[in-house]
Image (cartoon, rainbow, N blue to C red):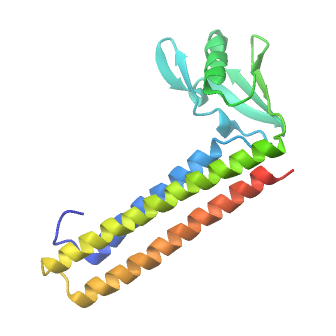
Amino acid sequence: MADENISVEEIQMESEEKMEKAIEHLKKEFRGLRTGRASTALVENLIVSYYGADTPMKQLANLSTPEPTMILIKPFDTSCIKDIDKAIQAANIGITPQSDGRMIRLNVPPLSGERRQQLATQLKHSAEAARVSVRNLRRDANKAIDAAQKAKAITEDERDNGKKEMDDITKKYIDLVDQVLKIKTDEVMEI
């Protein structure tokens, strides 16, 4: 956004794309959090050292949830089962893997009330970081709009309207963060 001859619409589009990425990042972060329900998202992006190469779990095994409280990991190559086991323990997700030599079972225990509160607090911190990111993008866009007006690429009215529209776009994404937070918090607090 350093170019002063950029239009207000281009500044807004660029900011909105980045805000969308902030929301996607938050959703991805939330998917990796353990709730009382089994979800392959908990382990699919764990990095396993497979023949010296760091490889995501989902590339090494078939992941499924045959029961609401169990994740089943079936490696394509059973020789890497110890590496997968080690990666799960190193990730410290609070679940002990159970291996029979062909597959690994992860029994997801129900969350305690205290753990639910800790997770809810963690969710709030992550959501606040996303809100800050969105607000910083608005600030940067407003600076770019000011610079464009200073360079006489846009009028004062266009600057003022552009800033007002940026506020509306920001509010939309802050509301999205709040929606994502509410959905995940409800899921964590569900008994």
How many marks the image carries: the answer is 0
**Image height of 163 relative to 111, above or below:** below
Q: Is residue 139 visible?
A: yes
- Name the residue located 22 percent from the left edge and 88 percent from the top edge: 156
In the rendered image, residue 126, in percent from the top left (x then y), is placed at: 56, 51
Residue 76 in view in this figure: no
Residue at image position (61%, 65%) is: 178
Identity of the residue drawn at 33% across and 86% down: 161
| Residue nearest the observer in this picture, 36 or 12 | 36
Q: Quadrant of the N terminus?
A: bottom left
* Location of residue 22 in the rendering, given as x and y in whole percent from the top left corner: 47, 56
At 83% across and 46% down in the image, what residue appears?
Answer: 113
Q: Is residue 74 above or below residue 175?
A: above
Which residue reaches farthest bottom?
157
Q: Is residue 51 above or below residue 35?
A: above
User: Does 6 sit left or right of 108 as displayed?
Assistant: left
156 sits to left or right of 174: left
Q: Position of residue 117 (x, y in %)?
A: 75, 49
Q: Residue furthest toward the front?
A: 114
Using the rendered view, name the quadrant where residue 82 is placed.
Answer: top right
